[in-house]
Structure formats: C-alpha cells, structure tokens
Image: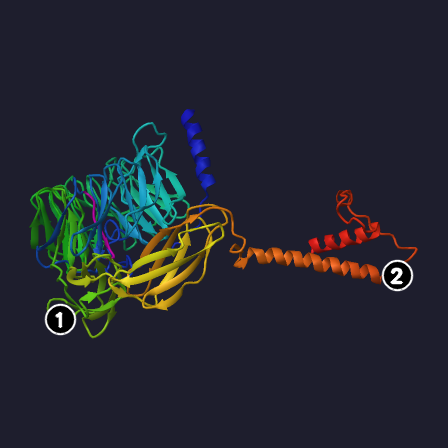
C-alpha cells in the first residue's frame, strides 16, 4: 500500500508539471549541426540523435598522433566535437573542453561524481550526467559555467543524453530506497524543466542511451526489453523482449525504418513501428556494441573480439575482422574515408576498410579502449583506460606572426601604429583573429586587415610615473591552425612634472579677511605658462579666479571664512604634456572681524549694513509723505500696531496711533515681500 501511495503522489506531481506539445519533425541524417569551425560536428554519443555512428567527415589515413590529453582517471565516454572543441568526460568526475587542434584545456567542470556517459552539445550548451550524482548538467559551451542542473541523487545516470526537438532525453536507475527501478526523463533543453518522466516500474533499470526518430524515443532496459515511447508525452507505444532476459545497455541505432540493437546473445533488427523482429544475427553468445549504420550496412563489435559488417535489410554477414581482445568500443563510420574505427581491449584503436574489413592501420595506447571514437575535421578523437584522450591525424600547421611599431618611444597618450604580419608558414594568412596585450597597460584599436596577411592596430601609451618598457604581445589564432605569437617593446616616458611654489600675503588675517596667493609654476627651473590652477581650502572660504601674470607667475585672492580657523589651502597646477603638481600653504584666521574688509558673496559687509539703513530711511519718508497726502474721513479706522511694538515707550514717541499703525503696516509689507 505504501508503494501505491507513493506512486500516486509521484504521478500527480508529473501531471502538475505540465507536458508541452512537440512536433515530430524528422531531421535529415548526417546533419548534426551547422557547418562551422568543425566540419560535420560530432555532437553526441554515436554522432546524432539516431545514433547512426556515421559521418561524412574524413578520418586520418595513418595512425599519426596529433596530441594526447591526460585526465585523472579512466575515459570510458565518447568525445563530442563541435566549434573547434573536444568535450569529453572522465571517471575522475570532470568533464573537459579541449582545443581540437592544440590539445590545450579550455575549461573543466567537476560534477562531484564519476562519469560514464558521454556529453552532448547543442545550442551553445554541453549536457553531461554524473553516474553516481544523479544530476544532468547543462554547461555553457565556451566557459564551462553551469546553466542548470536537474535530477535526483538516488537515481544514477549511465545513459548518454540525446538532444532532439528542443528536449534532452536520458534514462536512469535507482540506487536504493526507490519505488521505481528507474525512469526515462525528458527535459526542456533550454531551461531544464521536466517535460515528462516515464516510470519503468515494474520493468527494470535503464543504462541504455536513447535514440529519437519520427516522434518516438527508443531505448533498452536491463531486463532485456526494448521500449518505444511517444516523444511528446512519454506514453508507451510498444515494448518487446527480443532476446530473452539479458541486459540491454547499448544505444539503439535507427535507420531504414528499423531499430538495430545488440544483446548478450544476438544482434537484432526490429521494426521501428511495431517492435517486431525483422531479423537476428548470432554473435556467438557475446555482448554486442552499439551499431554504426549507413549505405545498407550495419557495423558492430562483440565481446569475442570481432567487428562485423552485415546487410542492414537481411542480416547476412558481409565480412568479419578480428582484434586481439573483446571489443567494447562502439565503431564509428567515416563515410569520407570509407573507414570503420573501433577500439579494443588489446589497447589498440583499429581502422578498417568499410567495404572489405581489411585493417588499414592501428594505434597502440597503454590500456583497453572502451571509448567510442568521434570523427571530425580529418581526425579521430577517443579516450582510453590509461586516463588519456587521444587525437590522431595531421598536426595542424602553426601560424607565424611578427609585429613592428611605427614609434618605439612614447609619452602617455601618444600613439604608435603596429604593423602585424601573419603567415601559415609559407603564405600570408587572412581571416586571422588577433589578441593584443601590453604589460604596462594602454589601449589598442581593433586590428584592421590591409593586404593579405597584413594587419594594423594603434597602441595608445598608458600614464606612467617613471620610464617604463612595455611588452606588446600579439597572439594570432584561426580555426584549423595552431596559434602563433610575436612581441615587441615600446618605451613609455612619463610627462615632465610640474613644480608648484606658493607664498601667502599675509599669512594671518581676521575672519573674512583676504589673503593674496602668489603662485609660481615651473618644470624644474623653467617657468610654465598657460597652466590651469585649481584651489581648495580645508576650512571653507572662497577664491577669485587665478590670473596669469606670465613667466610662470599666477595670482589668486583667498577670502577667508567668517570663523576662527587655520585653513590649509591646496594649490594644484596641470597642463597637457606635464604631470600635475601641487603645493599647500596654511594660514591663520583669528580675532574680531574687520567690517571694512569683511565681505559676503564678494560684497563688503559694511556696504550691506549701509544699504539696509538707507532702505529703512526711504520707507519711513514714503510713509510720512503718504500720511500728509491722505484726506481725513469719518470712515477711516487706523490699523493698530502689533502689541509687542506698541508697548515700547521709546518707539514712535510723539506719533499719533494712526500713524504708528501705518508705519508698522508698511514695514510688515516690506518684510513679507
């Protein structure tokens, strides 16, 4: 009853999430991504969502090692190759982004748990799942930063995700304490939101990597069954058990209306619509790898060390090739080179002729190879249990660069034009990306191309306080080439410094008094004319605009604050082509304000007092004149003066009460205006 209750709650949760609709668009084979910096990108395990394992890209014609990248543990996963980068996960809990041409690490991301499944790349994101972490991560392709993560710690993931129609599909299996053996999950590829989660109870756990075609999702289970689900809602379409109760942990390959899958006993071709068996092939009671399918032929390896090619329609064997140990690496088919590539537990990666099975070459590593190869840009990429990732193929040519400055000695703000040449070792190289740096700072304009292989950029010298030799470095890069670099040195000389000397006349005044500042600006012993003078005080006050007296002499007047203080006056001088200089002088403000010299807003304070007295007299005369000119009237009532003023015996003595009222009314009007 507890299981029934838990299952009911889970079902309600899934319904609450909502199931967005999706179309059943069927992508064309061999078009895993737009052509760009990687031809025919190998974007997920076995190339694409059909798990066809076949690409139009060419494989190398010889076992020439291009580079080798060391991880911290076994590399079981198959690399994904896209946008000039190789993405591969390791049992050391990390997923790595490696430059396709140089083998240099661009970034790594630690999932916190060991990783068996292969990463997938789409829409600028890398999708990778932890085997024991139960989380599927979406990472930024260029930086490795986490965009989102989704999953449950109880449900481990060994299945390699498939990306199709805006969704991510993968299976998992329960570690312990679950009411389901496993789930098959569809997530929104952009947000990570759960689209649907199909419970496999009471069937089995899921390690198989899914394939997607025509609105259906196909995968195997550990109980030997193969299931087809509706891609839109996760509902089962059919379920069959083609080979008995044996585990199916390989990816299914979809082609020609059939589902191709190997078990521990046989290899099967099932009808894609019904799940019925079209034919089976006896592998000699050994596990079979995921298949590569193209041109009417299916290729797969077995635990007995064989690689088979059989007719995709009839299941009739075309050829068999033998390695020195079991084959756990799913073969990859290079249509551009008519070549099958697969790793073996005898430590070799084999390259076989796809038509005849004849061995073309092999490459020896230090441990068994379980990783399935990825083919792109005329090269093959794979991992080994010796902890390394390998790239075989032609070593990329290295760019050669030179840089020459038009001027090698600058002052701050001055410009030197950099002439940069780039070749591929034998001819000028166009379309190159240039990155410029300066050890002492400064700025660069965006490099612009001139004639083929020739580029120009302007360097603006930085501000320095002493003579500095700055190293200018140029790094040239282009897809398909190893980067090249060059450097040169430019000397940056500081501006000559300004020296400021100030004398205060006098040095002590009463509050509000004026001090004349006599300022001398030189560069060493030479006077500097036309400098900009900036004045400030620590205790307030005001300054007149400085006047230039010529020959490096400047004058300004400092009106001191109205309170006693000891202000420090700072004098700063600047001029283009020179380093700024400054000086300080401290003056004393003390005593009783001198009303003769005291100013408010530049106006002598005594003038303000005299003006106020004169204004009062004018108002008084005006009111007296008005009184004499007004006729008497029986209806006239004088305005009473405010009590506070009328009570004063010394104010308006001898004036009538009417006149006093008029006087106060007039003064009140003036005060309110």
Q: Does the magenta stretch mainly form a helix, a strand or a loop?
A: loop
Taking 515 as reference, is 261 left or right?
Answer: left
Q: Position of residue 400 (x, y in %)?
A: 13, 64
Q: Nearer the viewer, residue 69 or 506?
A: 506
User: Residue at position x 52%, y 54% from top?
Assistant: 598
- Identify residue for label 2: 631
Q: Is residue 620 magenta?
A: no
Within the image, what quadrant is residue 439 found in?
A: bottom left
Q: Which residues are magenta?
A: 76-83
- Identify residue for label 1: 427
Q: Position of residue 603 (x, y in %)?
A: 54, 59
Q: Nearer the viewer, residue 443 or 661?
A: 661
Marks 2 and 1, the one that precedes in the sequence = 1
Residue 335 appears anywhere in the view: no
Does 407 appear above or below 126? Answer: below
Q: Position of residue 169 (x, y in %)?
A: 33, 45
| Secondary structure at numbered mark 2 | loop
Q: Is residue 81 magenta?
A: yes
Q: Nearer the viewer, residue 650 or 554?
A: 650
Q: Position of residue 356 (x, y in %)?
A: 11, 57
Q: Quadrant of the N terminus?
A: top left
| Gap in angstroms between the C-alphas marked 2 and 1 | 113 Å
Does 232 appear above or below 6? Answer: below
Q: Residues within 10 Å of mark 1 (few under 14, many from 20)?
A: few
Marker count (numbered) = 2
| Secondary structure at numbered mark 1 | loop
Q: Quadrant of the C terminus?
A: bottom right
Q: Nearer the viewer, residue 431 or 168?
A: 431
User: Which is more foreground, mark 2 or mark 1?
Assistant: 2
Residue extending farthest to the bottom is 451
């Amino acid at each position: 009853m507890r299981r029934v209750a838990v299952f009911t709650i889970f079902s309600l949760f899934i319904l609450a999430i909502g199931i967005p609709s999706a179309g059943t668009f069927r992508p064309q084979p061999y078009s895993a991504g737009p052509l760009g910096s990687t031809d025919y990108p190998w974007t997920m395990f076995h190339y694409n969502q059909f798990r066809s394992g076949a690409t139009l890209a060419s494989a190398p014609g010889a076992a020439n090692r291009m580079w080798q990248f060391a991880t911290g543990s076994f590399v079981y996963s198959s690399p994904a190759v896209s946008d000039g980068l190789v993405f591969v996960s390791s049992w050391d809990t990390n997923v790595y982004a490696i430059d396709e041409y140089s083998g240099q690490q661009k970034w790594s991301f630690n999932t916190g748990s060991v990783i068996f499944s292969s990463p997938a790349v789409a829409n600028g994101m890398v999708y990778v799942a932890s085997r024991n972490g139960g989380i599927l991560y979406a990472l930024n392709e260029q930086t490795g930063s986490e965009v989102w993560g989704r999953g449950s710690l109880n449900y481990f993931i060994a299945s390699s995700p498939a990306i199709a129609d805006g969704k991510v599909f993968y299976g998992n299996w329960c570690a312990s304490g679950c009411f389901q053996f496993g789930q098959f999950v569809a997530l929104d590829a952009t947000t990570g939101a759960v689209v649907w989660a199909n419970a496999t109870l009471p069937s089995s756990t899921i390690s198989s990597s899914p394939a997607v075609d025509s609105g259906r999702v196909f995968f195997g289970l550990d109980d030997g069954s193969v299931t087809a689900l509706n891609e839109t809602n996760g509902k089962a379409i059919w379920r069959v058990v083609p080979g008995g109760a044996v585990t199916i942990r390989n990816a299914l390959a979809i082609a020609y209306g059939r589902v191709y899958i190997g078990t521990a006993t046989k290899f099967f071709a099932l009808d894609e619509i019904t799940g019925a068996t079209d034919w089976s092939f006896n592998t000699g009671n050994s596990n079979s790898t995921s298949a590569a399918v193209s041109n009417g032929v299916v290729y797969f390896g077995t635990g007995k060390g064989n690689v088979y090619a059989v007719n995709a329609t009839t299941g009739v064997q075309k050829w068999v090739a033998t390695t020195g140990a079991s084959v756990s690496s799913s073969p990859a088919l290079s249509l551009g080179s008519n070549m099958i590539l697969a790793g073996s537990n005898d430590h070799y990666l084999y390259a076989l002729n796809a038509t005849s099975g004849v061995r073309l070459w092999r490459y020896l590593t230090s441990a068994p190879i379980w990783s399935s190869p990825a083919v792109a840009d005329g090269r093959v990429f794979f991992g080994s249990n010796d902890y390394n990732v390998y790239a075989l193929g032609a070593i990329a040519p290295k760019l050669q660069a030179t840089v020459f400055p038009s001027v090698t000695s600058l002052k701050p703000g001055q410009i030197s034009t950099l002439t940069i040449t780039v070749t591929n070792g034998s001819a000028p190289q166009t379309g190159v990306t240039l990155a410029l740096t300066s050890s002492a700072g400064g700025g660069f304009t965006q490099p612009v191309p001139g004639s083929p292989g020739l580029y120009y950029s302007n360097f603006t010298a930085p501000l320095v306080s002493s003579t500095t030799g700055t190293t200018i470095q140029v790094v040239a890069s282009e897809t398909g080439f190893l980067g090249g670099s060059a450097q040169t040195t430019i000397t940056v000389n500081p501006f000559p410094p300004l020296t400021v000397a100030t004398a205060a006349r006098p040095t002590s005044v009463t509050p509000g008094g004026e001090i004349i500042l006599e300022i001398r600006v030189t560069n060493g012993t030479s006077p500097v004319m036309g400098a900009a003078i900036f004045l400030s005080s620590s205790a307030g006050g005001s300054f007149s605009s400085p006047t230039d007296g010529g020959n490096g002499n400047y004058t300004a007047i400092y009106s001191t604050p109205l309170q006693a203080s000891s202000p420090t006056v700072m004098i700063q001088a600047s001029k283009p082509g020179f380093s700024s200089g400054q000086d300080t002088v401290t003056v004393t403000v003390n005593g009783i304000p001198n009303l003769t010299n005291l100013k408010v807003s530049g106006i002598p304070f005594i003038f303000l007092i005299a003006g106020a007295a004169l204004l009062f007299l004018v108002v008084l005369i005006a009111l007296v004149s008005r009184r004499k000119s007004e006729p008497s009237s029986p209806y006239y009532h004088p305005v009473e003066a405010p009590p506070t003023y009328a009570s004063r015996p010394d104010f308006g003595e001898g004036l009538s009460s009417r006149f006093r009222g008029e006087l106060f009314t007039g003064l009140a009007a003036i005060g309110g205006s």
